[in-house]
Amino acid sequence: MKSKRLLLHGPCHNGLYSVSSTKPQDLALLSIQTVPNLWHSRLGHPAAAILNRLSVNNNHIHNKSHNTMCTTCQLAKSKQLYFPTSVTTTTKPFELVHSDVWGPSHTTSIQGYRYFVTFIDDYSRFCWVFPLTQKSEFFHVFVNFHKFVQVHFNANICTIRTDGGGEYLNKNFKLYCKTWGIFHQYMCPYTSAQNGVAERKNRHILETIRSLLIQSNTPHTLWVEALHTAIHLINRLPTVTIQYKTPFEMLYQKLPSYTHLKTFGCLCFPWLKPYSKSKLSPLSIPCVFVGYALNQKGFRCFDPNTQRIFVSRHVIFNETKFPFQDQSLQTHKNNHRVPENQIPPLLLVPTSSVITAGNPTNNSNLAIPSQVTQLHSNFPNSSISPTETSQAPSVPVKNLRSHKMQTRSQAGILKPKPVFDLTHQVITPDPTSYKEAVKHEHWRQAMSHEYQALQSQGTWTLVPPTDNQNILGCKWTYRTKYKSDGTLARHKARLVALGYNQEFGIDYIETFSPVAKITTVRVLLILALHHQWAIHQLDVSNAFLHGELSETVFMKQPIGFVDNQHPTYVCKLNKALYGLKQAPRKWFEMLIGFLHQLEFTTSHSDPSLLIYRKDTSKVYVLIYVDDIIVTGNNSSVITQLLEQLQHKFKMRKLGSLNQFLGITVTHTPTGMFLQQTRYAEDILARAGMQNSKPVSTPCCIKKASEGNTELFSNPQLYRQLIGALQYLTLTHPDISYAVNRACQQMHQPRINDFDALKQILRYIRGTTQFGLPINGSSLTLQSNVDSDWAGDHTDRKSTTGYCNFLGTSLISWSVKKQTTIARSSTEAEYRAIALVTTEIIWLRRLLHELDCPQLEPTKFYCDNTSAIALANNPVYHARTKHIEIDCHFIRDCIKNHSIQVHHISTKDQLADLFTKYLSVTRFKLLAHKLINPIDSSVCQGVLGDKNKTQTTS
């Protein structure tokens, strides 16, 4: 009031003043709230703790709490967040697998490797390592590693954890993981800690490699040898993360052995007596110990002078001397490199856990060069890149036969010369995509050759696309073809239309196309051998392209060969390109039509067999898609036919028959020998069992209810292997019954079923050289038939088995489970006779068309006297009246003199092999009569022994 200043002003209402105020102090408070952020900016964005400390001693620096985030700090100071300890726990092997690819190495190994990939089982911490020449080989290595896990551990990889490398993110790997239900975890970019197990394992491996190389002054070109040795040792060392147990113990549930371990790089003396030039020459040479054999019980010994690696169990060690510390032994520098064609292939079956240098025996005098110490592991549709194997233990390896030890020099010269059964040709995997194939000159040439062939045939016409067109895709497929001796024949690229997108009634109508029956093939070969006719083989190049399309089909232009002037155009197909549903039919119609013009007639028994008769000339043509067999009694007519076929179609004359439908045909003094050795080896490689221990019989004597009845984790692998074995039975009748039993579990295989499958594979392992002998000694048809009454303990149905012979040559056989339950052994046997009768009637008609009529009834051999009596006598009673149709059919054939039923003792019944499990002795006896060269005394029916037969007519 003393200042005389007006403080407030307002209207008066009923004696009260109404006053309004703007509260300027609020503005001051708002300004104060911005001070902490202001000082944070002024001081260069220090941390909150630093600003707090500064405000204590400086009153003018205000430091009040604030919760706002500073964008500048986030941009300038962004850092990785704290990684908590992993809480992931696994309860069984292969539930989680860690993987990482290391490389490239500055030094290329002597085998040509620059990378390696690791697989670590999270549960056991067991590690597998595979060297790589390039990262692109990873996918093939993983596929084979996965199959190894499935076969040897009956397990499936549930999750794989990797970094974000291109080898892990390519479409093939993603598709494979999706197909097998493998969950793929990969780390965020630049976050290696998320794949810490694999990263730390690589560090551990490299530390061990460096230690091994440094302690012995070993050249860096031997780093792969040190790598395998490091893994061998690491898997046998206690590990903190698994409570100081060893990975080996965790995975195999047994303690590892350490008695075989020697110091890497030390002086050693392998026993080399087989290589001594004379009796006075030294029996050994100074070598360097570079590790443990990958698939043998032996040590790897490196000769610095010749750059060879010997593998032997007879080695003397001096662990106090290291030859590479004496530079005089290093006559070769570290830039030595083995050519690519000598790089050893991958083996996914690791070596045994115990490697000893025991007392010398004649069965162990082995030394294998580094180029051939591993066996090839090739899976169809899934071939692999050359790499070496890990040092993991496996099932015991078969005792090797007594062979001289052999090595291979750098020049590829072998000494001594005997063939060693562990050496395999290095097989480069076929590419699975255009992107892979285009990197190689030979595949580029193969694609160019195929494209030129398509253009010369006028396969398509480029047209602009229109609406509502069903445009098919296309792809390139690649296959390396080999000769019958296993050497390279050629690289084949083929353009295939994606016919699965075709629509019925628009893109195609009829699709059926006949192919030659394998029984017809055997009969025709026997007929040619009997008459001593020459057998010619033809192969049609781009066979389907000769077929004319009647439907309108559109297809995209092939990748890599898109027309530059019309890149958006599509191909209007004029010819039946491979992959189209109707392509086989169109080609067959074209070929058959041409042969009909040449006066050939089609056989009624087999539409793929065409017959030419004129005067005394007879020519037979058998067709299986684009593979053709020609034989007959007139060489001039055959020569004229071949010329006409070559003029009409682009054909290659392959000369005398030696390879047909994957079957190798070997000419012998008595006839031919049919075998599928290479195919059998491929099956074993696909299953990872090429080193398995052979067994004497393919049949597992355990009942279905015995063993582990849990579901098998990989039914697709089971089905693939069974399907492959079915084709192997074409020359392996001895496995027919075992394969038939395994086929009955394809819908839901269990672990004991897979064990039975492995029994078959182990039998194949010891019989890859077995096959089917045929000769033309006689053209008389006869049959053995048998049944196993109620042999299946699950449903009590019987099994029919028969084998048919033309002369002494086996031409057809069958194992078939009967569809109904037989009430007696007589009924089961009688149904078996009815089944084989249908086959015999067909064979008699086929032979009649081949001008080889069966003038006498075909003899059946059966060991059931009641069934023989029932076939001969029109007697019906309560136990057989329900099989009246079979009775009438068999009796009608007997009445028409088509068949005769003879009795044979059970011990002489060859069909026993196709109906039941047999003892090892019995199985070997019967199998030897079927899959080895046999004479006329083998088949009871050929002997016509009246003392052992009882005939009905």
Image (spheres, grey):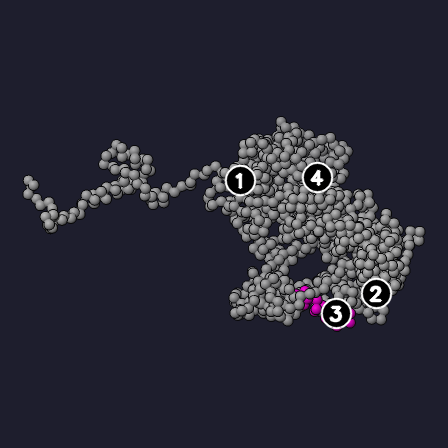
Decide whether residue 406 is among the magenta residues.
Answer: no
Quadrant in which the N terminus appears: top left
State left or right for residue 813 relative to residue 182. Answer: right
Residue 198, which numbered label?
A: 1
Examine the rendering and report whether any part of residue 435 can be seen.
yes
Q: Secondary structure at mark 4?
A: loop
For mark 3, what is the residue? 595
Q: Quadrant of residue 257?
A: top right
Who comes first in sequence, dot 1 or dot 3? Answer: 1
Magenta stretch, main secondary structure, is: helix
Mark 1, Cα crowd under 10 Å, few <14 / some 14-19 / many 20+, is many
x and y percent of residue 906 in the render?
85, 49
Who comes first in sequence, dot 1 or dot 2? Answer: 1
Who comes first in sequence, dot 4 or dot 1? Answer: 1
Mark 2, Cα crowd under 10 Å, few <14 / some 14-19 / many 20+, is some
Q: Residue furthest top?
A: 320
CB-based contact (under 8 Å), mark 3 and mark 2: no
Mark 3, Cα crowd under 10 Å, few <14 / some 14-19 / many 20+, is many
User: What is the distance, in whole Å, between disc 4 and disc 3 at their CAs?
Assistant: 54 Å
Q: Nearer the viewer, residue 717 or 295?
A: 717
Residue extent of the magenta highlight: 583-603
